[in-house]
Image: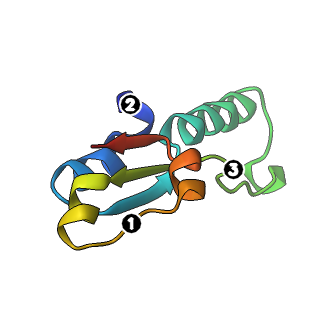
Amino acid sequence: MSGAEYRRARRFVVAGGLYAYASNHADVYRKTADYVLRILEGARPADLPLQQPTRFDLAVNLGTGRSIEVTAPASVLLRATGVIK
């Protein structure tokens, strides 16, 4: 598990958390930069559409799961952005 996109979620899981689910920060930053560009080009902020995150990151700590006797389903592990063993 690496990369700036899910660093915040990773910190929680590395510290011993079982799961962390958060918006993909790199995607949010790109959308923010697009908004800034539009405003600098003359768009009115009130005319810009409201956007919500569309990409999310899921981190799973299998060691924590084993210690509390919780098994992550295969479907969750397949969707996980990062898995710590």
Question: Disc 1 marks which amino acid?
Answer: Thr
Among the two numbered marks 1 and 2 on one chain, the one whose residue lies closer to the N terminus = 2
The front one of 40 and 9 is 9
- Check disc 1 and report the residue beneath it: 71
Amino acid type of the residue tagged 2 in the rendering: Ala
Task: Identify which residue is drawn at 64% across, 52% down.
Answer: 53
Q: Residue at x 22, y 61 (%)?
A: 64
Query: What secondary structure is found at the residue carrying circle 2?
Result: helix
Vertical arrangement, residue 12 with respect to residue 44, above or below: below
Horizontal relation, residue 69 to residue 24: left or right: left
Residue 1: where, in percent of width, then height? Answer: 35, 33
The answer to whether the residue labelled 1 contacts the one labelled 2, judged by CB atoms less than 8 Å apart, is no
- Give the crowd class for mark 1: few <14, some 14-19, many >=20 residues within 10 Å: few
Dot 3 or dot 1, earlier in sequence: 3
Q: CA distance from mark 3 to mark 1?
A: 27 Å
- The residue where tag 3 is placed is 54
Q: CA distance from mark 1 to mark 2?
A: 27 Å
Q: Position of residue 7 (x, y in %)?
A: 33, 39
Relative to 7, is 81 on the left or the right? right
Q: Nearer the viewer, residue 18 or 35?
A: 18
> Disc 2 and disc 3: Cα gap in Å?
17 Å
First along the sequence among labels 2 and 3: 2
Q: Give the numbered dot on residue 4.
A: 2
Residue at image coords 38%, 30%: 4
Q: Residue at 26% of width from left, 73% of height from top?
A: 69
Helix, strand or loop for disc 3: loop
